Image (cartoon, grey):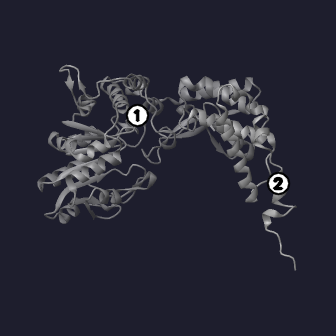
């Protein structure tokens, strides 16, 4: 009996499909690559074509799909080459309605913060004392404005709030006990778990109470000679409701200080304004925590604060001094552009202009009437181009692990399509030179004006008309 040929050698199967793939030179000669020939080096285009052909071979051998056509290969190679020449990180237009969108870089910076970053990107006085004409310290930047805005004694900025927590635990609680309510031993985005962070910082976690109810007496019973910290962690991305009890910061501060312990309060999202005044659930603010007696307060800079990614530690001057001198601080320090953006953002609070100047607070405070007017203007623009659309009521989300479950009423631009076509059009919007990120629900393309900056509207509408008029993906 003759031996059967391997599957990949069958004349009626994979072999014919592989042989149908064009050569590298044929793909390179396709007109889809014409617009790149004068701007990109030949080796980059060739590498993109080889990558596309290898993708096609792999897909054919796996039986995923038939061999792509020459135009399809050339278009894919052009996209890869263009992406390679511009880098991976780029400005996108957030039309999802999620204000602090973790996947889209969280808080957009204010115009003043952007200018400050640009200025600091050149030579700066990062570690130079201009008055004395000698070496200075990067750890002095942003401290004075934090003191004025929050009333703290001193402050330290590190690269994110997780780093802030690790630093505090390593400095003050290595091989010591930290008491935490069982309901606050949380996991937030990216698998960040408080118990594991405690372990990383060398602290011994002592959980007290239950998931929904913890009393001051539970902390008192757990104190031993090896206890150094009482800790409170704000559950930023979920909320326990109903039959619940937790001591407030003032009660925990009194308890901790009566036993010679420190109170560390991780408030998470870094609100410096009262969210309740915007019709939202109240978030703990740094000012309230300090007034309640917390020795150290930790929070993020890129959530409700509306600044760059960083972790901010406020508190008693002697404690901050110890943190500043700790060897780990150098590994966690931030660069000049982060400090510049943070200081510029904080100045908006100091001047009483946060709601007007900081994009996160512009979006949170945007009146429904304004949003509806913008959505109607978008709809008029699309209709003038012959595109059918409507404006419908909807909800914007806060996002970013802040104010879980909280939404704000909004108005959405809605473009009715089929489920398949809506997905294709959304993908095409993401592939524009300035990508537009929209929502798709039940075959309808949805865009929320709340999270689109006014300076982005012209590009957004150009992209929308170009993509929705095109019949290239309609089949």
* Mark 1, secondary structure of its residue: loop
Q: Which mark is residue 68?
A: none
- Disc number for residue 17: 2
Q: Dot 1: few (<14), some (14–19), or many (≥20) neighbours within 10 Å?
A: many
Quarter-wise, where is residue 435 in the image? top right
Q: Residues within 10 Å of mark 2 (few under 14, many from 20)?
A: some
Residue 20 position within the rendered picture, expressed as x and y whole percent measured from the top left: 83, 50
* Residue nearer the viewer, 45 or 237: 45
Q: Nearer the viewer, mark 2 or mark 1?
A: 2
Closer to us: 103 or 78? 78
- Residue displayed at 69% across by 47% down: 442
The quadrant where residue 119 appears = top left
Q: Which residue is mark 1?
A: 306
- Quadrant in which the N terminus is drawn: bottom right
Query: In which quadrant will I find the C terminus?
Result: top right
Residue 432 coordinates in the image, percent (x, y): 65, 33
Evaluate if marks 2 and 1 touch, with contact meaning CB atoms under 8 Å apart: no
Q: CA distance from mark 2 to mark 1?
A: 53 Å
Instruction: State the image coordinates of residue 300 (x, y, percent, origin top left).
Output: 36, 41
Mark positioned earlier in the residue sequence (2 or 1): 2
Q: Is residue 215 above or below residue 3?
A: above
């Amino acid at each position: 009996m003759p031996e059967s040929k391997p599957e990949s050698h069958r004349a009626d199967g994979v072999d014919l499909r592989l042989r149908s793939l064009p050569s590298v030179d044929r793909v390179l000669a396709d007109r889809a690559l014409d617009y790149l020939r004068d701007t990109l080096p030949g080796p980059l285009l060739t590498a993109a074509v080889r990558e596309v052909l290898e993708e096609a071979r792999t897909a054919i051998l796996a039986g995923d799909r038939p061999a792509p056509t020459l135009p399809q290969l050339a278009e894919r190679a052009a996209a890869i080459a263009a992406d390679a020449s511009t880098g991976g990180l780029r400005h996108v237009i957030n039309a999802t309605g999620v204000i602090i969108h973790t996947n889209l870089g969280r808080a957009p910076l204010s115009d003043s913060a952007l200018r400050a970053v640009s200025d600091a990107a050149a030579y700066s006085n990062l570690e130079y004392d201009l008055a004395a004409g000698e070496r200075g310290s990067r750890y002095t930047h942003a401290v004075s404005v934090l003191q004025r805005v929050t009333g703290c004694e001193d402050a330290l900025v590190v690269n994110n709030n997780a780093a802030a927590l690790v630093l505090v635990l390593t400095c003050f609680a290595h091989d010591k006990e930290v008491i935490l309510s069982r309901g606050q031993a949380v996991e937030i985005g990216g698998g960040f778990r408080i118990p594991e962070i405690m372990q990383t910082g060398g602290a011994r976690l002592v959980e007290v109470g239950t998931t929904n109810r913890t009393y001051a007496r539970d902390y008192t019973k757990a104190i031993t000679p090896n206890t150094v910290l009482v800790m409170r962690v704000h559950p930023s991305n979920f909320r326990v409701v109903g039959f619940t009890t937790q001591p407030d910061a003032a009660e925990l501060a009194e308890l901790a200080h009566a036993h010679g312990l420190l109170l560390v309060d991780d408030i998470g999202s870094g609100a410096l304004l009262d969210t309740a005044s915007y019709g939202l659930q109240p978030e703990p603010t740094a000012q309230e925590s300090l007034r309640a007696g917390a020795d150290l307060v930790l929070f993020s800079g890129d959530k409700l604060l509306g600044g760059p990614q960083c972790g901010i530690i406020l508190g008693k001057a002697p404690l901050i001094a110890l943190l500043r001198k700790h060897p780990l601080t150098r590994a966690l320090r931030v660069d000049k552009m982060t400090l510049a953006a943070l200081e510029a953002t904080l100045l908006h609070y100091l001047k009483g202009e946060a709601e007007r100047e900081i994009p996160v607070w512009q979006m949170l405070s945007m009146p429904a009437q304004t949003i509806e007017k913008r959505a109607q203007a978008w709809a008029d623009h699309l209709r003038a181009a012959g595109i059918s659309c409507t404006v419908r009521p909807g909800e914007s989300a806060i996002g970013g692990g802040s104010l879980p479950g909280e939404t704000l009423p909004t108005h959405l631009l809605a473009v009715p399509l089929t489920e398949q076509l809506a997905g294709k059009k959304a993908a095409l919007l993401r592939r524009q030179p300035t990508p537009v990120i929209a929502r798709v629900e039940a075959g309808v393309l949805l865009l929320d004006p709340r999270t689109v900056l006014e300076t982005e509207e012209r590009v957004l509408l150009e992209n929308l008309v170009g993509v929705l008029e095109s019949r290239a993906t309609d089949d």
